[in-house]
Amino acid sequence: MNDQEWNAIRPVIVRLRASLMAVAAGVLGGFGLFVSTVWLVERGGPNVGAHLSLLSNYFPGYRVSWGGAFIGFAYGAVASAAVAYSVAWVYNYALLKRLDNGTRR
């Protein structure tokens, strides 16, 4: 394969779209934390969500409550989106570095 052909196909080689991954993971992460919080609130009990409430150490304002469910959705969405975007970016960077170092066929 010559350089002209390589330059034509390089942009479409199994690359992840970091922005789409971030949106998808953000929605899933936010929804997951929301549902977890609501489930524990509805379940009730003497010590509701003892383990999940530890997230308040990382997410200020988060509590295992109805209000905390919405705050948790926002925090979960942002944190999940940031992680997914970072993973996709690193994957794309490593893939293109590997391809540029002569391992293309």
Image (tube, rainbow, N blue to C red):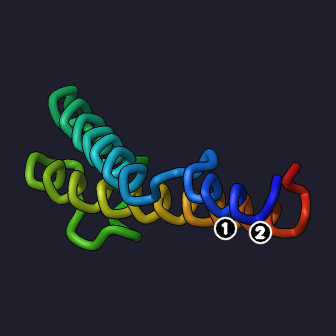
Circle 1 SS class: helix
Up-down: is 54 above or below 45?
below
Q: Residue furthest top?
A: 43
Which residue lies under the disc numbered 1? 93
Up-down: is 12 above or below 86?
above
Residue 57: x %, y % from top left: 39, 70
**Mark 2 and mark 1 residues within 8 Å of each other at the beta carbon:** yes
Give whichever of 76, 5 is nearer the camera: 5
* Amino acid type assigned to the residue bearing label 2 in the image: Lys
Give whichever of 77, 86 is nearer the camera: 86
* Amino acid type assigned to the residue bearing label 1 in the image: Tyr
Q: Judge from the rendering whether residue 54 lies leftward or rightward of residue 10; answer left or right.
A: left
Q: Residue at x 43, y 47 (%)?
A: 51
Which residue lies under the disc numbered 2? 97
Q: Residue at x 90, y 57 (%)?
A: 103
User: What label does residue 85 carry, if any?
Assistant: none
Circle 2 SS class: helix
Q: Residue at x 76, y 65 (%)?
A: 3
